Image (cartoon, grey):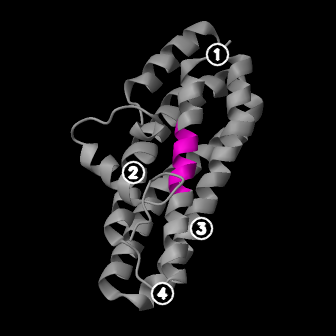
Amino acid sequence: MRHLALDIIHDEHQALAAMLRSLTMLLQQARREGELPDFAVLRAMLFYVDEFPERLHHTKESELLFPKIRARAPEIGATLDRLDRDHAHGERAIRGLEHALLAFEVLGEPRRAAFEEATDRYVRFYLDHMAVEESEILPTARRVLDEADWAELDAAFAAHRDPLTGHEPSEEYRPLFQRILMQAPAPIGLGAAH
């Protein structure tokens, strides 16, 4: 049986993976062309990661999904502990990445390598995190959760939908998503970003 929460989690993982790959591609393209990247687009992309995956997606996983799985599948408790630590680390890491971007933008080329290295670490960390959720946690959830669990999870995950998964952004976020979609490179956007 299909569950809306699982579809939403998977769609949000795909959107985030595309955003992270676009972020990396934007930096690689700027370096190849010997130019500075479009800082406004980079800021918008990092703001998106902070607002949607970090604050909304992870919160629902750590506060709703993981405790339900932990109660019925204690054998994967260590993996859930690691993923909860990842969520806490991710919040600090995005702040560090935003700071490294500001340093690059304000101080220029001497801070480029530090930002690019921090971005690479963050992208690898996040892609690995999502791979563990997809390969271990979501199959376990399918196996151990009951219909009452799924009803609660489906409602919670449907309450805030990521606009990068095909849902209309709220008026507040419309300018953010227009900037990302029009200026960021594929796979998330339509632009070359400079």
Tell me which amino acid carries mark 3. Arg
Residue marked by disc 3: 121
Q: Is residue 77 visible?
A: no
- Measured Cα–Cα span from mark 1 to mark 3: 34 Å
In the depicted structure, whether residue 35 falls above or below residue 187: below
Query: Dominant secondary structure of the magenta stretch?
Result: helix
Magenta highlight on residue 151: no
Secondary structure found at label 1: loop
Mark with earlier residue (1, 3):
1
Mark with earlier residue (2, 3):
3
Quarter of the image where one finds residue 191: bottom left
Mark with earlier residue (2, 1):
1
Residue marked by disc 2: 181
Q: Which residue ends up furthest to the bottom in the rendered image?
A: 110
Q: Magenta part of the protein: which range? A: 12-20
**Label 2: few (<14), some (14–19) or many (≥20) C-alpha neighbours in 10 Å:** many
Pointers 2 and 1 in contact (C-beta within 8 Å): no
Which circle, 1 or 4, is nearer the viewer?
Answer: 4
Which circle, 1 or 3, is nearer the viewer?
Answer: 1
Tell me which amino acid carries mark 4. Gly
Mark with earlier residue (2, 4):
4
Tell me which amino acid carries mark 1. Arg
Mark with earlier residue (3, 4):
4
Magenta highlight on residue 15: yes
Residue marked by disc 1: 2
Viewer-proximal residue among 91 and 9: 9
Residue marked by disc 4: 34
Mark with earlier residue (1, 4):
1
Q: Residue at x 33, y 87 (%)?
A: 107
- Measured Cα–Cα span from mark 2 to mark 4: 24 Å
